[in-house]
Structures are given as C-alpha cells and as structure tokens.
Image (cartoon, helix red, strand yellow):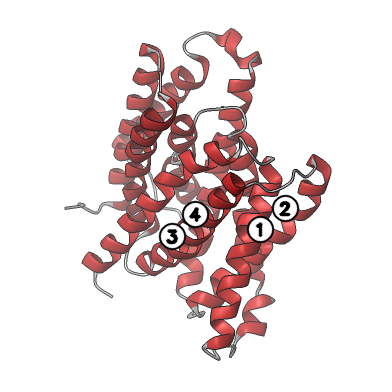
Amino acid sequence: MDRTTGRALTLTAAFFWGTSFVVIRWGLIYLPAMEFLFMRFLVSSLVIILLIIINRDLNGFKSALFSREIMIAGILNALGYTFQFLGQQYTIATNASILINLSAVFVAIIAHFYLREKLNHIGIAGIIIAFIGVFFLITKGKPVNIFSSHFIGDVLCLLSGLVWALYIVKSKEITERGFNDEQLLAIWFMYVTIFSTPLMLIQGLEPLTMEGWIAIIYTAFLCTILGFLFWYKGLKALEATTSSIYFVIEIAISAILEAIMFGLNLSILEVTGAILAVVGVFLTDYSFSNVKVK
C-alpha cells in the first residue's frame, strides 16, 4: 500500500471518529455509558466474527487470540474506551475530541523514552503549548473549576488520550507481525466487550430505546468496524505519529456537528485553550515524525 492510500484510509477513519464524539454524547442521553460501550462492541464483535467465519479465514486466529502483544493492546484499547465513555457523561464532545487527540503528544513523550526517539526544541515547545491549552480548556482559567463535574469528564478524556497513545505505539509494533487485520480487530473488539461487562452490571442497565439502538448501530458499523479497519490498514503505510496528526480533523468535525445538534458554546478562554492544544499537537507531531504531510 502506498502512502497516498494510507492517508486516504486514515482520513476516512478520522472522519467517522470525529462524528462519533457527538453521536456518543447524544446516545448517552438514552443509555448508561457502560451499557452503550458494551452494546457497541458486542455488535461489532459479532459482525466481524461472522464475516471471518463466512470467509473461512480462521487460520492463525488461535495464535493471535493468545498473543501477549495483542492482549496488551486489547486491554489498552478497552481502557481507552472506558475512560472516554465515562468522561463524555460529564463533558462536551468537542472537549473530548481535543483531549483524546492529545494522544499524539503523549506518543511523542513515550517515544522519547521508550523508543529513544529524542524530541527536539520544536517538539518540547509543542508539548508545553499543548498542556497550557489543556489547562485553559478544562479550567477556563479558574483553578476552582477542578471541583466541577465538567473537569472530571475532561480529566477522564485526557486519561483516555494517554492510554490510546500507549495503544498506538503497541499497535504500530503489531503491524509488523503479519497478523490478519480482521482477526486482530475482532480480538480487540472482544476485549472491550469483556472488559465493559462487569462495569456495565455495576453501573446498571436501562431498556434499549430506538434512539439508543441508532447510536449503537451507527458507532458499531461506521466508527468501530469500518473506522478501525481503515485506520489499521493506513497505519501499515504511515508512521504512528504521522497517522495521529490526521486525527486532528476529528476536532473540527466534532465541533461543527456539536454546534448543529447541541448549540456548542465555548468561552474565550476555552477557545484559546482549544487552539493552543491543537497547535501543540501539530508542532509535536511535526517534530517527532519528521514527515511533511502534503
């Protein structure tokens, strides 16, 4: 696969994931967070496993299922989604998309130590700018806001970005192992389903409404099955951090849809924080990947 195709697939995945933040916010009106998460990945797991069976593509499934690397990545992915869904109960979709996409900054920090890819001055500046932006975004410039539920939601989404940074680094390593894409994603979806089951039972269940099913089906098919397939295939042609820079468009898509559906209203400090966070992501990605995106 060439880089152009990899970019196209990654951008398509980013578009679907950008819409997911708003659909999740809407779906959480009708479903508890963990029930929504469980149902989304249960549907995704069943569909992709059915496709694997129909295609008679089970060779290597058992070895992939018990692979230590895949297991670690699966647990990280499950944790990332858990933090996101819990966080989006208390914060707006645009904040969630910005904070989660700081994973690119976290990738750079992790790579500095784990992969020994040293940050230059631009990368360090990007990290500092990004976290100044995060401070303005989640506190609105007032430290007293750390006691609000909005702050709790933002912190959970920030933790989601950190966990997904670890997941991206681990996934890039796995792309070089030659596992079947559909089998790999089926296993990761199963991990999220299993991980969310006890949390769903603890949080409690609500009867599924038509609106709840719409949110589940949309996120399961477009944002999970297609989104992950496109992203993972694109990741094979792109560096992990180069791939992550394209996900910044998720923020724009989320903000536009949220403005249409919910009447997005941000203060000047929140807008300033959002801009600084995005600029920080761009600077960090640019310095880390050393790849010019056209």
Give how far across and how far down residue 271 sits, in percent.
Answer: 36, 20
Mark sitting earlier along the chain (4/2): 2
Task: Give the secondary structure at mark 4.
Answer: helix
Badge 4 amino acid: Tyr
Q: Nearer the viewer, residue 242 or 35?
A: 35
Mark sitting earlier along the chain (4/3): 4
Residue highlighted by disc 1: 192
Residue 281 visible in the snapshot: yes
- Image quarter of the N terminus: bottom left
Side of 193 where 175 appears, left or right: left
| Distance in Å between CA atoms under marks 4 and 3 | 11 Å
Mark sitting earlier along the chain (2/3): 2
| Distance in Å between CA atoms under marks 2 and 1 | 6 Å
CB atoms at circles 2 and 1 under 8 Å apart?
yes
Give how far across and how far down residue 38 sits, in percent.
Answer: 68, 54
Tag nearer the camera, 4 or 1: 4
Establish if 202 lies above or below 63: above
| Distance in Å between CA atoms under marks 4 and 1 | 17 Å
| Distance in Å between CA atoms under marks 3 and 1 | 15 Å
Tag nearer the camera, 4 or 3: 4
CB atoms at circles 4 and 1 under 8 Å apart?
no
Residue highlighted by disc 2: 196
Residue highlighted by disc 4: 218
Give how far across and how far down residue 292 sits, in percent.
Answer: 20, 52
Residue displayed at 52% across by 15% down: 139
Badge 1 amino acid: Val
* Label 4: few (<14), some (14–19) or many (≥20) C-alpha neighbours in 10 Å: some
Side of 161 where 289 appears, left or right: left
Badge 2 amino acid: Ser
